[in-house]
Amino acid sequence: MDAPREHIRVSGLEMRYGSRVIQSGLDFAVMRGDIFVIMGGSGCGKSTLLKHMIGLYEPASGEVLYNGTSYQRCDGEARAAMRQRWGITYQSGGLFSAMTLAENVALPLTQYTSLDPRSVRELVAYKLALVGLAGFEEYYPSEISGGMQKRAGLARAIALDPEILFFDEPSAGLDPVSSRLLDELILQMREALGVTVVIVTHELASIFAIASNSVYLDAETRTMLDTGDPRELLLSSPHAAVRRFLGRGAAPGVSS
Ligand SMILES: Nc1ncnc2c1ncn2[C@@H]1O[C@H](COP(=O)(O)OP(=O)(O)O)[C@@H](O)[C@H]1O
Ligand SMILES: [Mg+2]
């Protein structure tokens, strides 16, 4: 049987910090193979949504379903099994500074598999090569550039062959060239590994370069205004705020 096309569903989600509602009424689906962008202005709750999706926070109400199974209704063991199918990258790369790149990427492999050291070494080399870091095994994070650190973080996130990759502002702090390289790498990952990608970003260039689907969170009304392919939303969202957000700069391939 084919895997269902709908990979993730966010259903009736309300998110709060204490009594403060950050967003409510979130309902959308991420399809298998999507590069799904969570977008919206600063402070609207993008990172908060990502953290709810990866189970770091419990929803005030609602749930997040993976392949039709609610993460919130699972017990601890089932949740851990679901999390093992995800690769999560952190803003700074999230690498351990006292470990080499090879040791960083090997970490999930030694922790969650019983592979022998030689297989681990081979897999580490393969994952580093996939992100363009072949030969950098013995480098420490401080010895490479910010863009390379993020790619090494990505190599670690794909160590266990995840079904879903999560990114929060992956190009924050990168120059435009490294930022474009990272976008290309994300596209390649989707092709090479067949993953679904969920990514937080407010960078228009990134959104139009990689997104196949998206949700727009509005800070004022504290709810989502629209969901869909950002190119279509730019042209035909009924919400002016969404069109304004996506139309801030010249969108590649779209004339005004
Ligand atoms: N751990 C937290 N505790 C309380 N408030 C938080 C916490 N994290 C973020 N916030 C607040 O929640 C709102 C949404 O934050 P965030 O999800 O980080 O927004 P974004 O990623 O869209 O910029 C902001 O007003 C922020 O100050
Ligand atoms: Mg954020």
Image (spheres, grey):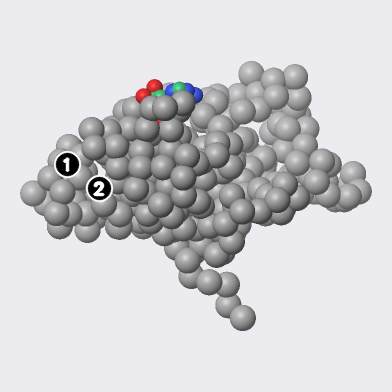
Say whether mark 2 is within 8 Å of ligand 1. no
Residue visible at 72% across and 47% down? Answer: 76
- Where residue 21 sits in the image (x, y, percent)? 37, 32
Foreground label between 2 and 1: 2
Question: Is the residue marked by circle 1 packed among few (<14), some (14-19), or many (20+) residues within 10 Å?
Answer: some
Query: Measured along the vertical axis of the image, is residue 187 above or below residue 157?
Result: below
Q: Please indicate whether residue 113 sits to the left or right of residue 225 in the image.
A: right
Q: Please indicate whether residue 32 sits to the left or right of residue 88 in the image.
A: left
- Judged from the image, the quadrant occupied by ligand 1 is top left
Disc 2 on helix, strand or loop?
Answer: strand
Q: Is residue 151 visible?
A: no
- Where residue 86 sits in the image (x, y, percent)? 62, 49
Residue that badge 1 annotates: 241
Residue type at mark 2? Leu
Query: Measured along the vertical axis of the image, is residue 169 above or below residue 198?
Result: above
Looking at the rendered structure, which numbered label has been put on residue 225?
2
Residue visible at 52% across and 45% down? Answer: 53
Q: How many marks?
A: 2
Quick check: marks 2 and 1 in contact, CB under 8 Å? yes
